[in-house]
Amino acid sequence: MRMKPELDLSDAEEMLDRAALEARSNGWSVSIAVVDQGGFLIAFRRLPDASRSSVQIAIDKARCSALFRRPTSFFEDMLSSGIAGTSSLANVVPMTGGLPIIYQGDVVGGIAVSGVKSAFDAQIAQAGLDALTEASG
C-alpha cells in the first residue's frame, strides 16, 4: 500500500509566514487559512485590521480547494460562464483566492486568502504555496 504524504503544522506555519509577508509587503489586511486534504483547518492567521467576514471566507475557500482539488477560480469561472448549479454545490466557493496544495502528485490540502480583491487574494495564497514548494524542492 502506498503511503500518502500529509501536511503538518510546520508546513502550514511556513506557508502562513510567507503568505503574511506577501500581504504585509503590499499593505493588505487579510485572513489566511491552511487546511488538510479533508478540508479541516490546520493553521490560520488573521492580520491586523482584516475584516471579520474574511475569516470564514478564507477557511471555506481553502476547504473548497482541498476537497475539489482545484483552485477556487475554477468555480468562479464556471459561474461567470453561466454554468448553472455551480454555486449550489456543497462546499463550493466560487471566488478566486483558494489553491490546492499538491505534493508529489497528491492533493494534501488547501491554502486560501480573503480580504482584498480576488486577484490579490490569489497572489498571497500563491506566495504561501511557493514556500512549501521551495522547502520541498
Image (cartoon, rainbow, N blue to C red):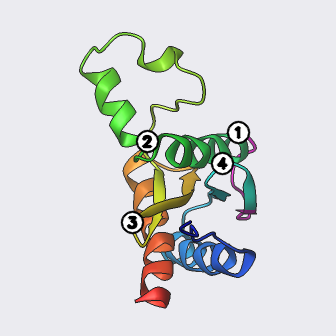
The residues bearing labels 4 and 2 have C-alpha atoms spaced at a distance of: 16 Å
Of label 2 and label 1, which has the lower sequence position?
Answer: 1
Quick check: 83 left or right of 58? Answer: left
Of circles 1 and 3, the one toward us is: 3
Task: Tell which of 10 and 105 is nearer to you.
Answer: 105
Q: Of callouts 3 and 4, which one flags the residue occurring earlier in the amino acid sequence?
A: 4
Label 4's element?
A: loop
Give the magenta part as a residue range.
Answer: 43-52
Tag 2's secondary structure? loop
Label 3 belongs to which residue? 105
Of callouts 4 and 2, which one flags the residue occurring earlier in the amino acid sequence? 4
Which mark is first along the chain, 2 or 3? Answer: 2
Q: Residue at x 42, y 43 (%)?
A: 96
Q: What amino acid does circle 3 point to?
A: Gly
Distance, label 3 to label 2, CA atoms, is 19 Å
For residue 53, which numbered disc appears in the image? 1
> What residue do we see at 55% from left, 56% from top?
110
Kindly report the distance in space between the C-alpha atoms of the residues bearing marks 2 and 1. 18 Å
Q: Which mark is residue 72?
A: 2
Quarter occupied by the C terminus: bottom left
